[in-house]
Amino acid sequence: MINHYLSDGILKILLNRPEKKNAFTNAMYRELTQILSEADQNPQVKVMLISGAGNSFSAGNDIADFMQSPITHEDAPPINLLKVLAGLTKPLIAAVDGVAVGIGATMLFHCDLVYAQKDARFIFPFVSLGLVPEGAVSLLLPCLVGHQKASEILLFGEPISAEDAQALGFVNKVVLEPSALPYAEQRAKKLAALSLGSVLRTKSLLKGGELKAAILKQIDIEGKLFIDRLHSPAAKEALTAFIEKRAPNFDELD
């Protein structure tokens, strides 16, 4: 469900489950974690570029798969993926078409460059599902947009347009063409032509040292709370309501 190939120093990664809007299963989490880990150690890889098949980047967790195999420990596939993303030493570029939901949105905060097609939408639905944010977005988003705006985004989980995402600072450019991928490929080629040593050291300066340690610590903190909330009555009601295509009822549920 994840395709990848190396061309001219660029590892192109495709989330390839378009019939489910590239929603992640546990198997996909494991596969992507392995691909990224190996690429970061491969001397032939200079840049990584990730995109989604069809008209979506990723709808986040596959809820049915998630309910069958919920996160029960801090070494779960989604948390491992987030830690690998946070620890990458090589640049990662994202080309976002359509929706980026849940982890499909939070993982973008660990990409170094994000290009979005004009109709892209970013959704952080954690609270509406009775959960809490993941991927250190509760640390990174306030640093980027301020406490009040981050609170609005994470508490309400309302869709954010590509233009608004660019204005907020977590999208580099809004692409007017039918897909953001061709433009992202151009930028990847330009980056791959630069001095790899300089690129790696610049990335380390931008997101290394104390910041990387803080990000990994926040992923752990969020992960513990996420697991706790996942087994709460509120989360069970929200996930069941999602499957049943109805509004959740949180009355007297914690």
Image (cartoon, rainbow, N blue to C red):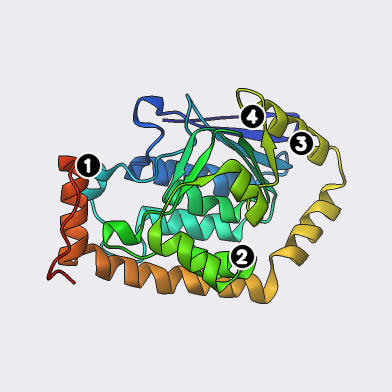
Distance of label 4 from label 2 (alpha carbons): 26 Å
- Whichever of callouts 3 and 4 sits on the residue coming sooner in the sequence is 4
* Residue 196 x, y percent position in the rendering: 82, 48
* Residue 215 x, y percent position in the rendering: 56, 69
* Residue 237 x, y percent position in the rendering: 16, 56
- Residue 212 sits above or below residue 170 on the image: below
Q: Are marks 1 and 3 in contact (CB under 8 Å)?
A: no
Q: Which residue is mark 3?
A: 187
Residue at x 37% of width, y 41% of height? 24
- Whichever of callouts 3 and 2 sits on the residue coming sooner in the sequence is 2
Residue 68 visible within the image: no
- Residue 247 sits above or below residue 251 on the image: above
Using the image as rendered, state which of residue 81 and residue 38 is in the foreground: 81
Using the image as rendered, state which of residue 222 and residue 234 is in the foreground: 234
Q: Nearer the viewer, mark 3 or mark 2?
A: 2
Q: From the image, which quarter does the N terminus lie in?
A: top left
Q: Amino acid at mark 4?
A: Leu
Q: Which mark is residue 79?
A: none
Using the image as rendered, state which of residue 232 and residue 208 is in the foreground: 232
Q: Amino acid at mark 3?
A: Arg
